[in-house]
Amino acid sequence: MVQKPKIQYVGQFYVYGSEAQALERKKEHRRAKTKLPLSRIERIEKIYVDPVALGGIVVAFVMLFTMAAGALQLREDWEDYSRMSGYVSELKKENAELTKTYRAGYDLEEIRKRALALGLVPSDEMETVTIQVQIPTPEPEPTLWENITWFWKGLFA
């Protein structure tokens, strides 16, 4: 195997103070940089609009307006319903009163006597007859296939 070489340092030849001196930089009077006035750059602000989002917002407002109009219409309809149900109950009461007045206004025995005087007969004294009627069946219309065969037969006859 190869041996490592022995490392020798320069320290044996080095004497303190024998190194090269670093050069000092001369201080220069710096002149102030002249600055030109900067022209203000006009900022153009661009607003990007997403058409899909804008369409969604418009649809949402339309739906909100429709819902509000529907709620108002529903409220009016409930008022009409309550008003009409009250009117119907009043009509039912009036109808019951008129029916009572009507039934109290005539005598059934007197009506029976007048009917007999006109020659009418009570229904329990009449003979009943049952009649059976058979409805004739209409002729069936020709089918599509029959129409086609009729056409071809007439064409080649």
Image (spheres, rainbow, N blue to C red):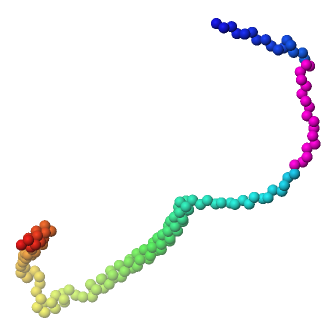
Relative to 119, say whether 83 is above or below. above
Q: Position of residue 35 (x, y in %)?
A: 85, 52
* Residue ID at (9%, 73%): 154
Residue 17 image-quadrant placement: top right
The stretch of residues the image draws in magenta is 17-33
Q: Position of residue 107 (x, y in %)?
A: 22, 87
Residue 131 located within the stretch drawn in magenta: no
Image label count? 0
Relative to 77, say whether 35 is above or below. above
Relative to 52, say whether 147 is above or below. below
* Residue ID at (91%, 30%): 23
Relative to 56, say whether 15 is above or below. above
Quarter of the picture holding the C terminus? bottom left
Residue 82 image-quadrant placement: bottom left
Q: Is residue 115 visible?
A: yes
Residue 18 located within the stretch drawn in magenta: yes
| Left or right: 111 in relation to 71 | left
Q: Residue 87 or 104: which is nearer the viewer?
A: 87
Q: Is residue 140 visible?
A: no
* Residue ID at (55%, 61%): 51
Q: Residue 42 or 143: which is nearer the viewer?
A: 42
